[in-house]
Amino acid sequence: MTSFDPFSSIIALGIKLRSGELSSEDITRVYLDRIRKYDGALRAFVEIFENRALEEAREADANFNAGIDYGPLHGIPYAIKDLYDVAGVPTRAGTDLLSENVPKSDAFIVSHLKALGAVLVGKTHTVQFAYGGVGVNNSLGTPVNPWAEEHHVPGGSSSGSGVAVGAGLVPMALGSDTGGSVRIPASFNSVTGLKTTVGQISRRGVFPLSWTLDSVGPLTRDAADAEAVYRVMAAKDREDPSMQVFRPLIEEQSDESSDCLAGCRLVFPETVFFENCDSEVEASVLEAGNVFSDLGASIKHGSFDAANAALALNPKGLVIAAEAYYSNRKWIDEYFHELDPVVSHRIIKGRDVTAIEYLDIQNGLTSLRKQAIDFFDATDALLVPTVMIPPATLANCQSSVEAYSKINVSCLRNTAIGNILNLSAVTVPCGFNAQGLPIGLMIYGRPFDELKILNIARAFQAKTRWHLKRPDIALREV
């Protein structure tokens, strides 16, 4: 079997697949071997589909040999957060309470990627009901951040997906993002994570948390890979009501990153995003401005008032709480005392949100989202810290519910604004703190501007090497 770098990008693997240097079965076996070797310590996965994966890999190879090429994910192994339905496999959403929740069909995206030759290797850990930004799961286990010897949290709620990509167990994984659940683990594991606009990618067959805020997206090695995956995932699903606003992608992906952002207008917002931010996080994010200046972009500091207004309008995440409780009330009411306390004390608040409170927030969001869209008439993107703090230790998060809550709020603050306003966003690695823990830069764009912000991210990564760093996971071998 030909060896290769398991931290290779999807695009690099695709080149080797098409040249015949590697087969999909070769690639899949390497990742399955890495999962066997390291995941006992990392705990990224809840299910491994070894037989299915090898079957799909052989099918992908057979199609290549027959001259059939289904595109950039053909023959590429990937993992999915345990919110995505796979026929005959429980969708547990982070809790054994749902161990009998066995779907009869695949989620739309799982089916779509299978039809295009992607190879599904397994399901990854998530927070209970996907309700938390820290990544802690006190019942099924918390994945281990590969960047620290002591157990640091992976970010949530797509915790296992972040660790799986960050540790080189798969080149790509899918997550969901309701308040930051793709971007936080991407930042904490030093990978790229894309938060898509609601309605641009099908959510059918993905366990719901908040029907107005849920979005799905990929975690990848770099922004070029994120763009390739996004282009495949952005397919119209007529059975998903949220996709009534879907916008087809027209232009094709460029093989080369732009080395010039002349005319690109970038803003560091002098609003809530930098308040009480960790000093090393803030310094790394502001330093990224120099890279963009060298690329020819215009860099300004200015206000983005919709951010502060969004947090004020939706105090304590009442929209998510109300919708999460409504969607999952049959389990929450019956098994409340069996739930993880870091989830139960938050989700139960949704039961007491009144119709007037909920509708007041939704009505206010309509005008706030218009205000945010208008802001981007004069700005291409915002540059902010993805998370205002570095990854915390698991021990600190588990010391008390109060400690967890404080850390969780710090994890979610900057990312949740994007969900409330339905912005597009991508996080990319932009440095490490003195302890060697990753720091993420988030690029915010207007709704449906995924390709624009990904181009900005690709230009940044063409001039930096943060995304090429890798953790020493030999420490994790068991």
Image (cartoon, rainbow, N blue to C red):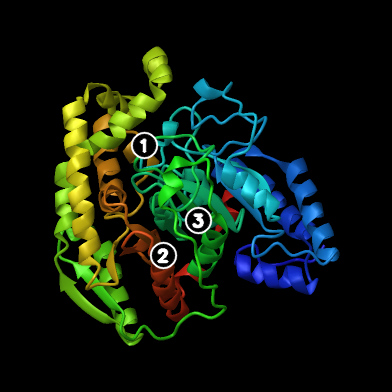
Residue at disc 1, secondary structure: loop
State the CA–CA distance, disc 2 to disc 1. Answer: 25 Å
N-terminal of the pair, mark 2 or mark 1, is 1
Q: Are marks 3 and 1 in contact (CB under 8 Å)?
A: no
Separation of marks 3 and 2 at Cα, in angstroms: 10 Å
The amino acid sitting under disc 2 is Val
Query: Which quarter of the picture shows residue 323?
Result: top left
Residue 381, horizontal then vertical, whole percent: 29, 69
Figure check: 223 above or below 27: below
Query: Horizontal and vertical percent for residue 62?
Result: 84, 58
- Alpha-carbon neighbours of circle 3 within 10 Å: few (<14), some, or many (≥20)? many
Of the residues tagged 3 and 1, which is closer to the observer? Answer: 1
| Image quarter hosting the N terminus | bottom right
Mark 2 or 1: the one toward you: 1
**Label located before the other in sequence (3 or 1):** 1
Q: Quadrant of residue 448?
A: bottom left
From the image, tell me which residue sits under label 1.
210
Does any portion of residue 294 appear in the rendered image? yes
Query: Residue tagged by mark 2?
Result: 428
**In this rendering, would 130 be left or right of 37?**
left
Q: Which residue is mark 3?
A: 219
Q: Is residue 37 above or below residue 284?
A: above
Three-letter code for the amino acid on which mark 1 is drawn: Ser
Q: Residue at x 36, y 85 (%)?
A: 295
Q: Residue type at mark 3: give it.
A: Leu
**Badge 2, how many Cα within 10 Å: few under 14, some, many 20+?**
many
Give 361 or 83, whichever is nearer the viewer: 361
SS label for mark 2: strand
